[in-house]
Image: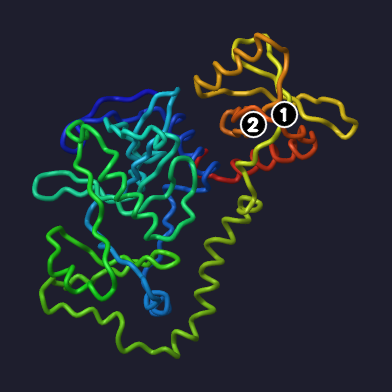
């Protein structure tokens, strides 16, 4: 990973310069977790979203003047690394800025791919990263509701961050509140804000107009005097809008519900190269056919299989295909039936086609 040391926030960090490394990092998030840091998944407020906002237990936070970023904890060559990934690409650049920062978490499982979103805010001569949401947690997409996700944020900040002084910024949880608390929270808020964000089954941004002034008499007319007939008329438009954004994305990836992380049971044999193994699946005639080579990216797994191959020439493994490197990642030993060559080959084709159609990461 080629990186240059830079002044970053309150101290320093390492700016990643290698575009290939950036591309592979973004591909990993897109392929494995179907998350694109450059895509805006949020919606701007419209009257037709009012019913969503009025649902019980809707939670809110502020839209700040800070820069939207992602805090990404992962492993690079078996080393625990934390990155800040910016959500926008600067002019004349192919990829967003990615900065490696000193950051220490006492639970090493966080580095099995954990991703938080938030705002990098400069206020009162100090930089603070305000975490708003948890997107990935220890290698899994978060399927829980927003309240459960922010509990994970709270748990990280309260219990798992060590040596906070080495980080180039302070780290806090963004204030979360209910709809009926909006007026008081705006009056009490000390940081510059641009609007209110509503967390329903999707995120809705309500931006203040240019003449907005924060004061004790602020009255958010968002929930009053709306033409509900008009909202009913626009429901079909809303449906079309979602389909325009999401269904096109599904078409581009053949099928967004396809399990790109699917694991296969394969036979593994040693190759002539150290720590590189050949993998085989069974064809319809029960013959072993070569399906690719493995990439073992964790030392403990590599040592485990080195010890196995001192005693025997082959074993069964669970593996997951990685189209970034065109290799298989070994997950563990397997006691399952060996996967068919036809199904495994089709999976490889689907994975490779998926990336060919994503222009932003070329």
Describe residue 261's horizontal placement relative to residue 298 as left or right.
Answer: right
- Name which quarter of the figure residue 319 lies in: top right
The correct choice, above or below, for 182 with respect to 298 in the image is: below
Q: Which residue is mark 2?
A: 319
Q: Residue at x 17, y 44 (%)?
A: 127
Q: Are marks 1 and 2 in contact (CB under 8 Å)?
A: yes
Measured as percent of width and height from the top left, residue 102 is found at 26, 30
- Name which quarter of the figure residue 86 lies in: top left
Q: Which residue is mark 1?
A: 266
| Crowding at mark 2 (Cα within 10 Å: few <14, some 14-19, many 20+) | many
Distance from Cα at disc 1 to Cα at disc 2:
7 Å
Measured as percent of width and height from the top left, residue 70 is found at 35, 45
Measured as percent of width and height from the top left, residue 249 is found at 57, 56
Describe residue 171's horizontal placement relative to residue 283 as left or right.
Answer: left
Viewer-proximal residue, 92 or 161? 161
Q: Residue at x 27, y 62 (%)?
A: 176
Instruction: Tell me, for residue 299, which label it has, or none.
Output: none
At numbered mark 2, what does the secondary structure look like: helix, strand or loop?
strand
């Amino acid at each position: 990973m080629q990186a240059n040391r830079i002044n970053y926030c309150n101290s320093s960090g390492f700016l990643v310069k290698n575009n290939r490394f950036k591309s592979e990092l973004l591909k990993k998030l897109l392929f494995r977790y179907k998350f694109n840091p450059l895509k805006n998944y949020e919606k701007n407020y419209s009257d037709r979203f009012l019913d969503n906002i009025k649902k019980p237990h809707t939670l809110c936070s502020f839209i700040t003047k800070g820069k939207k970023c992602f805090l990404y904890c992962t492993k690079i060559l078996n080393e625990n690394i934390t990155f800040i990934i910016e959500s926008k690409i600067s002019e004349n650049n192919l990829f967003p800025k990615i900065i490696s920062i000193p950051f220490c978490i006492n639970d090493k499982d966080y580095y099995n791919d954990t991703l938080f979103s938030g705002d990098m805010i400069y206020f009162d001569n100090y930089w603070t990263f305000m975490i708003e949401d948890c997107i990935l947690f220890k290698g899994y997409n978060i399927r829980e509701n927003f309240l459960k996700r922010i509990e994970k944020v709270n748990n990280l900040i309260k219990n798992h961050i060590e040596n906070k002084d080495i980080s180039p910024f302070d780290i806090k949880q963004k204030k979360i509140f209910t709809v009926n608390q909006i007026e008081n929270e705006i009056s009490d808020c000390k940081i510059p804000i641009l609007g209110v964000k509503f967390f329903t089954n999707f995120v809705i941004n309500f931006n203040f107009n240019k003449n907005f002034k924060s004061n004790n008499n602020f009255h958010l007319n968002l929930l009053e005097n709306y033409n509900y007939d008009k909202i009913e008329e626009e429901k079909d438009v809303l449906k079309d809008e979602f389909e325009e954004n999401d269904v096109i994305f599904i078409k581009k990836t053949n099928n967004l519900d396809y399990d790109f992380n699917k694991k296969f049971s394969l036979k593994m044999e040693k190759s002539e190269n150290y720590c590189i193994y050949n993998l085989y699946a069974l064809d319809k005639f029960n013959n072993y056919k070569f399906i690719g080579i493995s990439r073992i990216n964790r030392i403990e797994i590599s040592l485990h299989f080195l010890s196995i191959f001192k005693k025997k020439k082959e074993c069964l493994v669970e593996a997951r295909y990685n189209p970034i490197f065109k290799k298989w990642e070994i997950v563990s030993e397997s006691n399952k039936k060996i996967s068919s060559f036809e199904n495994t080959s089709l999976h490889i084709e689907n994975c490779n086609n998926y990336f060919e159609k994503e222009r932003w990461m070329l």
